[in-house]
Image: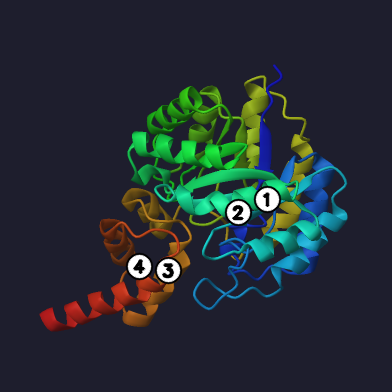
Amino acid sequence: MEKSIKLTEVCLRDGSHVVAHQFTEQQVRAVARALDDAGMHYIEVSHGDGLGGSTIQYGKSLVDEMTLIEAAADVCTKAKVAVLLIPGIGTVNELKQANKLGAQLVRVATHASEADVSAQHIDKARELGMEALGFLMMAHSVPIEKLVEQAKLMESYGAEAVYITDSAGALLPNEVRERVKALRDTLNIEVGFHAHNNLSLAVANTVAAIEEGATRIDSSVRCLGAGAGNTQTEVLLAVLERMGINMGIDLYKMMDLAEDIVAPILPVAQEIRKGSLVLGYAGVYSSFLLHAERAAKRFGLDARDILMELGRMKVVGGQEDMILDVAADMAKSMKVRG
């Protein structure tokens, strides 16, 4: 069965969180070249927090992301290079520079209730001739009606697809189905889905999204992504082939890439450990894990307690600076009680 699903490999963007944004140009070239050779459709390259993310607050990159974008574009003959842009972190100027260096697609990402800040960036991307997609982060945190409302705003700004982004890996398969169906029933553009594996549901959730009509899908080879990683590309491809869905991507080449090129890059194997499990359980943004672990070490706390408190506070992406404040307050409170 042929299905017009477009796959975006996010290991060189979401995976940046795992390596503390220390990708080298050689690593990006090697991964992008192998992905292109395997037939990947899109390869997203940027700082983990998108264009402009290399800051003290989010984590400084080892190599300027524009150099990495140019390197990926240089080795790709079939795959298109994509970037992520979060308004307030990335700017139109950085988008223009990325496009000039070879980026052909941008996902403009906002919190699930803040789509209105994406208008300028979606419009500029379309003006530049790029594919412009909306990316509604922390999609578990708002009612479905709100998600639909925000997706319609992105469509009105010119987005060619809108992603339901499970940034915390908190959604269950039935919740994914409900959200994808709601957007499919309402929008006249494509619906996408981006998963995290914090509750070990990324592949199952992605399959549920595809069955409900999502045609823009994200995955990450060897699960190289924030928290416990994203939908594992080579696993998803094997499952889709078992379902009779031909993606036009070479499964064996993706397996070899995962084993021979990506595995050596990982500081530790991607698995669901106590920190990433709490991300999904508490509904916390996946890229907060490393920040919470560092804060826990600094203040003598359990990172799980910090993450649970962040979940109760409903902290969203972009509020990384609050993690230290929360940890400091928790440590002070414990000292007072002690």
Q: Taking 123 as reference, is 193 left or right?
A: left
Taking depth in this image into account, of 283 and 185 the one nearest to the observer is 185
The residue that label 1 is drawn on is: 125
**First reached walking from the N terminus: tag 3 or tag 1:** 1
The label shown at residue 54 is: none
What residue is rendered at 39% in x and 36% in y?
A: 172
Q: CA distance from mark 3 to mark 4?
A: 14 Å
Q: CA distance from mark 1 to mark 2?
A: 6 Å
- Badge 3: few (under 14), some or many (20 or more) residues near its Cα, within 10 Å? some
Check if mark 1's residue and mark 2's residue have beta carbons within 8 Å: yes
Q: Taking 96 as reference, is 75 left or right?
A: right
| Residue type beneath disc 1 | Ala
| Residue type beneath disc 3 | Glu
- The x, y position of residue 227, in whole percent, is 48, 56
Mark 3 or mark 4: which is in front? 3
**First reached walking from the N terminus: tag 4 or tag 1:** 1
Q: CA distance from mark 2 to mark 3?
A: 23 Å
Mark 3 or mark 1: which is in front? 1
| 306 up-or-down from 224: above or below | below
Q: CA distance from mark 3 to mark 1?
A: 27 Å
